[in-house]
Image (cartoon, helix red, strand yellow):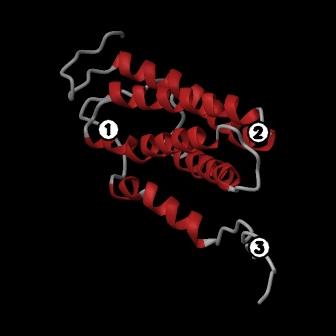
């Protein structure tokens, strides 16, 4: 009879395969691949603050890379992050906002919802950065381009909602 005590093996190191973030990226962009953008509705006037159309896919691809990179670091259990569960939940909300933006803006034609989505993304990302910066400044730095872009995009989105009617809500342009 042995008196040796059983010790559990050490946990496997946290590892992400290359295809996992790629698959996630394809899933969150699925509707955007189908809905090609353009004008949300006939007569829509883009805000003069809005960058040219080619800027958006370039910026959002880059921002997706930064957000996924930060999210992978957030998911790593070896990193001591106090608000990990809350941060994962908030990041999930930003990904839902991102994944549904083309639907609300281009398919439904709502500049009001597009502005609300953009401002919400900015606020949630700002909260995420404030929370994660206490424990992992690297993730906060990785996510910083997201608040820079969505802060600017929020101004553009609000201006766009003010100068255009919203067919979904049946509201007229409030400004311009």
Q: Quadrant of the N terminus?
A: bottom right
x 41%, y 26%: residue: 115
* Front-most of residues 62 and 24: 24
User: Residue 141 — which label?
Assistant: 2
User: Residue 7 — which label?
Assistant: 3
Mark 3 vs mark 2: which is more N-terminal?
3
Q: CA distance from mark 1 to mark 2?
A: 30 Å
Q: Name the mark nearer the viewer: 1 or 2.
A: 2
Q: Write down the residue under mark 1.
A: 104
Q: Are the two marked residues, 3 and 1, in contact with CB atoms closer than 8 angstroms?
A: no
- 113 in relation to 62, above or below: above
Residue count near mark 3 (Cα–Cα under 10 Å), binned few <14, some 14–19, many ≥20 = few
x 62%, y 28%: residue: 126
Question: Secondary structure beneath disc 1?
Answer: helix
Residue 18, horizontal then vertical, whole percent: 64, 71
Q: CA distance from mark 3 to mark 1?
A: 53 Å
**Left or right: where does residue 170 sit relative to residue 69?**
left
């Amino acid at each position: 009879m042995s008196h040796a005590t059983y010790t559990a093996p050490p946990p496997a190191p946290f590892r992400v395969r290359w295809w996992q973030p790629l698959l996630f990226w394809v899933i969150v962009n699925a509707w955007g691949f189908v809905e090609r953008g353009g004008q949300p509705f006939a007569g829509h006037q883009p805000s003069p603050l809005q960058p040219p159309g080619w800027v958006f896919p370039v910026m959002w691809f880059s921002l997706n890379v930064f957000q996924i990179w930060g999210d992978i670091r957030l998911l790593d259990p070896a990193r001591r992050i106090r608000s990990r569960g809350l941060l994962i939940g908030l990041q999930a909300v930003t990904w839902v906002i991102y994944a549904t933006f083309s639907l609300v803006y281009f398919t439904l034609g709502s500049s009001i919802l597009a502005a609300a989505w953009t401002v919400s993304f900015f606020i949630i990302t700002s909260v995420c950065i404030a929370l994660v910066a206490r424990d992992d400044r690297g993730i906060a730095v990785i996510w910083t381009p997201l608040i820079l872009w969505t802060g600017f995009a929020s101004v553009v989105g609000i201006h766009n909602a003010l100068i255009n009617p919203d067919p979904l809500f049946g509201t007229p342009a409030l400004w311009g």
